[in-house]
Amino acid sequence: MSKICQITKKAVMSGNNVSHAKNRTKRTFEPNLHMHRLWSEAQNKWIKLKLSSKGLRIIDKYGLDAALEKYDIT
């Protein structure tokens, strides 16, 4: 599975490790993702989502059904 948040669309970024001597080696920055099973009142069923911590905070703020509608998740 891809490492993308289903709410915020955060994905893996690439960059460099930089040593004290300014040597650069490639590395990846991965989002903080977790699988969550959340209850949807509108659909009356459990929904499994791969969420970043920011995405989980958005769901706490707006509610699951409003967040799914606002961020166009089917």
Image: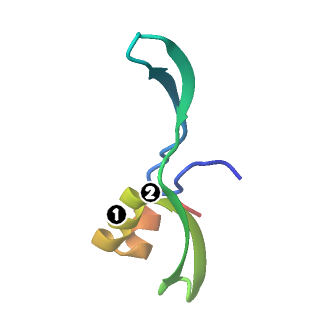
Q: Residue at x 33, y 65 (%)?
A: 57
**Which callout, 1 or 2, points to the residue nearer the camera?**
1
Is residue 20 found left or right of 13 in the rendered image?
Answer: left
Where is 6 relative to 61, above or below?
Answer: above
Q: Quadrant of residue 69?
A: bottom left
Is residue 57 found left or right of 18 in the rendered image?
Answer: left
Q: Which residue is mark 1?
A: 58
| Residue 29: assigned label | none
Q: Residue at x 42, y 74 (%)?
A: 64
- Amino acid carrying label 1: it is Ile
Q: Residue at x 47, y 87 (%)?
A: 41
The Cα atoms of the two marked residues, 1 and 2, are separated by 10 Å
Q: Residues within 10 Å of mark 2 (few under 14, many from 20)?
A: few
- Amino acid carrying label 2: it is Tyr
Task: Give the image location of residue 34, x and y in percent.
Answer: 53, 64
- Asked if marks 1 and 2 touch (Cβ < 8 Å), the reply is yes
Q: How is the image coloured?
A: rainbow
Q: Secondary structure at mark 1?
A: helix
Is residue 14 found left or right of 67 in the rendered image?
Answer: right
Task: Give the image location of residue 25, x and y in percent.
Answer: 55, 18
Q: Residue furthest left?
A: 61
Task: Give the image location of residue 44, x and y in percent.
Answer: 56, 89
Q: Residue furthest right?
A: 1
Where is 9 relative to 72, above or below?
Answer: above
Q: Residue at x 28, y 70 (%)?
A: 61
Q: Which residue is mark 2?
A: 71
Where is 11 relative to 15, above or below?
Answer: below
Where is 11 relative to 26, above or below?
Answer: below
Q: Number of callouts in the render? A: 2
Task: Give the image location of residue 74, x and y in percent.
Answer: 59, 64
